[in-house]
Image (tube, grey):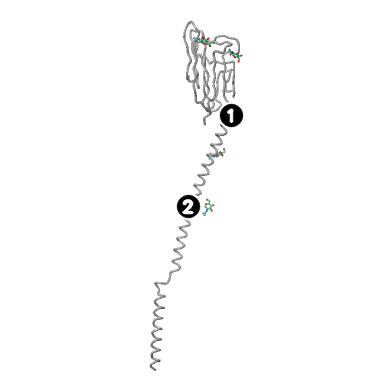
Amino acid sequence: MKALVCILLLLETFVFVVQQQVDGGLNEKEIPDIPAALRELTATVTEQKGNIRELNATVTELRDEMKKKDDEISNLTLSQVELRKENRDRGIAFSAALWESGDGYIGPFTTEITLTYKKVFTNIGNAYNPITGVFTAPLKGAYMFRISIYGHGPESGASIYKNGERVVIAYDNQPKYDLNSSNGVVLILKVGDVVYVRLWPNSRIFDNGNNHSTFSGYLLFPLI
Ligand SMILES: *[C@@H]1O[C@H](CO)[C@@H](O)[C@H](O)[C@H]1NC(C)=O
Ligand SMILES: *[C@@H]1O[C@H](CO)[C@@H](O)[C@H](O)[C@H]1NC(C)=O
Ligand SMILES: *[C@@H]1O[C@H](CO)[C@@H](O)[C@H](O)[C@H]1NC(C)=O
Ligand SMILES: *[C@@H]1O[C@H](CO)[C@@H](O)[C@H](O)[C@H]1NC(C)=O
């Protein structure tokens, strides 16, 4: 009987402990709130997706920009190569003396006149027109021009003009003897710019088979 009471007591204690554990272990506070956790997780994933989209957009934008820059660079390189090729294909250089044949003066006139140098030595690229005396730039670049004039007084003068503006002159003045003068200039020309020589008013220049009075020009290098 004593033993039975003892066992009963033990059993009761065990049940109490188990009950306590069940109550304590599974109490409301410690049950994970799975829907809430899922909601939180979903929110985080949604946010991360947004971040990824933003990043993706930035990367795509950067890639597009890089591609555009690459295109620009390759276009530039291409145009430089083309320009160099074009320049190699057609150099620009001319040189001419005043009279096609024979000898004589031109001038004096009371106003300036454009000189037409008719004896063409060289005209690579045909940018110089011996009928009008005008050089027309076929491409943008730095060009060198030069004139020499020769006469016998009282005065000899000529000017290099660019698009209607006087740039440099060659001039000499003495009543009795030979006159020689020359000048040259480097000019930056755009396509279509014109360069020519005009005789100074009231002056005259001479030429003969010795080719004293000349006009020359050539492309130094092209510019983009
Ligand atoms: C990133 O953007 C590109 C186009 O802009 C799209 O094709 C690709 O699917 C996107 N990737 C992600 C992970 O959003
Ligand atoms: C490059 O050249 C091509 C062909 O001329 C043109 O279609 C394109 O727009 C150019 N790209 C840039 C970025 O200038
Ligand atoms: C001018 O140049 C010619 C050769 O073109 C020469 O015969 C003459 O002596 C020179 N005159 C003067 C004044 O320098
Ligand atoms: C002047 O130019 C003509 C044509 O090129 C040439 O025949 C002649 O020899 C030149 N005169 C002199 C003195 O160089």
Instruction: Find numbered disc 2 in the image and state the secondary structure of the residue it sits on.
Output: helix
Q: Is mark 2 within 8 Å of ligand 1?
A: no
Q: In x, y percent, where is residue 85?
A: 58, 31
Q: Which quadrant does the N terminus fall into? A: bottom left
Horizontal and vertical percent position of residue 58? 48, 49
The quadrant of the rendered image in which ligand 2 is seen is: top right
Q: How many marks?
A: 2
**Residue 208's x, y, as percent?**
57, 10
List the residue tagged with mark 1: 88
Q: CA gap, disc 1 to disc 2?
A: 49 Å
Q: Which residue is mark 2?
A: 55
Amino acid residing under circle 2: Leu
Instruction: From the image, state whether disc 1 or disc 2 is nearer to you.
Output: 1
Closer to the chain start, of discs 1 and 2, is 2
60 left or right, relative to 11: right
The image quadrant that residue 88 belongs to is top right
Numbered mark located on residue 43 in the image: none
Element carrying mark 1: helix
The residue positioned farthest toward the top in the image shown: 176
